[in-house]
Image (cartoon, rainbow, N blue to C red):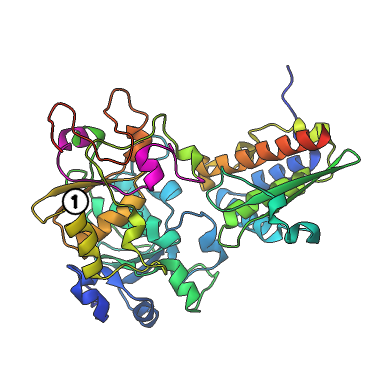
Amino acid sequence: MTEPRLPAALAEIRDEFLELGESDRLQLLLEFSNELPELPERFRDHPELLERVEECQSPVFIVVEVESGVVRVHATAPPEAPTTRGFASILAQGLSGLGVDEVLATPGDVAFELGLTRVVSPLRLSGMTGMLGRIKRQVREAAA
Amino acid sequence: MPVAPDPFEKFQSYAHPERLVSTAWLEEHLDDPGLVVVESDEDVLLYETGHIPGAVKIDWHTDLNDPIVRDYIDGAAFAELMGRNGIARDTTIILYGDRSNWWAAYALWVFTLFGHDDVRLLDGGRDRWVAEGRAMTTERPARERVDYPVVERDDASIRAFKEDVLAHLGKPLIDVRSPEEYSGERTHMPAYPEEGALRGGHIPTARSVPWARAANEDGTFRTADELAAIYRDEAGIGDADEVVAYCRIGERSSHTWFVLRHLLGVPNVRNYDGSWTEWGSAVRVPIVTGAEPGTAPGTGAR
């Protein structure tokens, strides 16, 4: 059995993290956090369309769109929760634009490959794992 | 104490008024020699988005917990952590953080395990400082490294382990979690499923006093009279009692520990940091479900 490979955009993000020393990785996570795009207008006024990620300790909401087999991930989280925003931003940037099968083949424990285990702690990273699980489930439902 | 206490009137009716500082006082004293401000948050990146000028960051996961064993760092690691942040043994430490100071209170409790004498909380924490529009910066202070002695952690006086709690059953025990966690409807706090346990409920005889009852809407502590009504009159805690507080991993109960020990002045209070994540998953420890405290097994007490 071969190891599941990361989609190109996520692999690039992982390499960006791994090239840095541990303390600089937090700074990069903060950059991702600041880059989390605003929700598209069609979701901004419709919070009921978004799903709360219960695995995260802060209120983060995600919604997935699949159009012609292409996945788009949108997320929103408050500025007081920069870590959660960072995770959401990594997944939104790393998964948007991929095909359904590519998203579903993304390893569930990708959060632990970013070199953040020591600087962020495993407990906090499980929030990102939960987020990815919910994204995949939404993709599966949207593609069905 | 190297730095004089905040004379703010509200604090004077607490048993130990010198354990709190107000935001206005702190703003005036940021540059005092012998004072270091420490931010301690749930969110590991929050400090990086902006903090009180001059404040250093100490994180409970990555700085205070041992990376391997479920325990706190040892005396040597603590000395290194303090020294690297420019904190000497006689430094006045002002702690503040997010979530009504949960993690700041937790850090304060851990610092106390190492016998650091002058540790104080910023009343209202980070949210209040921000809400009042006080200065924030993203600039990391360059603090000169100082020598901090290697001090053995004292786990005997303010920390309780599972065995201590088993032997304690029948004496005052405070469960500071939400009512749903206490009754056993939930094995974890809403939105904290990774910190769950295999069983739901509470430790037999524990009284439910959710931590938030000690705080006002703005995160500041309630007045001494209000706190006495909750903990002394309602929960029946007296100065002669030995008290143990617990929650899920020991951070919310650090908040209650601070209230009981420093604001009400109850001399003998311990925090059970193993808390429900240990008790609710341990084999063959007694558990009670529902809204009533229940009785201690084999003793018929309460």
Q: Is residue B79 left or right of residue A131?
A: left
Q: Quadrant of the C terminus of chain B?
A: top left
Element assignment for label 1: strand
State the residue in front, A135 or B84.
Answer: A135
Q: Is residue B97 visible?
A: yes
Q: Measuring 19% from the left and 68% from the top, which residue is drawn there?
A: B16
Residue at the farthest bottom position: B28
Residue B181: x, y in percent? 39, 42
Q: Is residue B9 left or right of residue A99?
A: left
Say whether residue A47 is magenta. no
Residue at the farthest left position: B240
Q: Is residue A20 positioned above or below B1 on the image?
A: above
Q: Is residue B6 visible?
A: no
The magenta-colored residue range is B165-191
Q: Measuring 50% from the left and 39% from the top, which residue is drawn there?
A: B193
Q: Measuring 35% from the left and 42% from the top, which residue is drawn there?
A: B182
Q: Is residue B144 left or right of residue A114?
A: left
> Amino acid type of disc 1?
Val
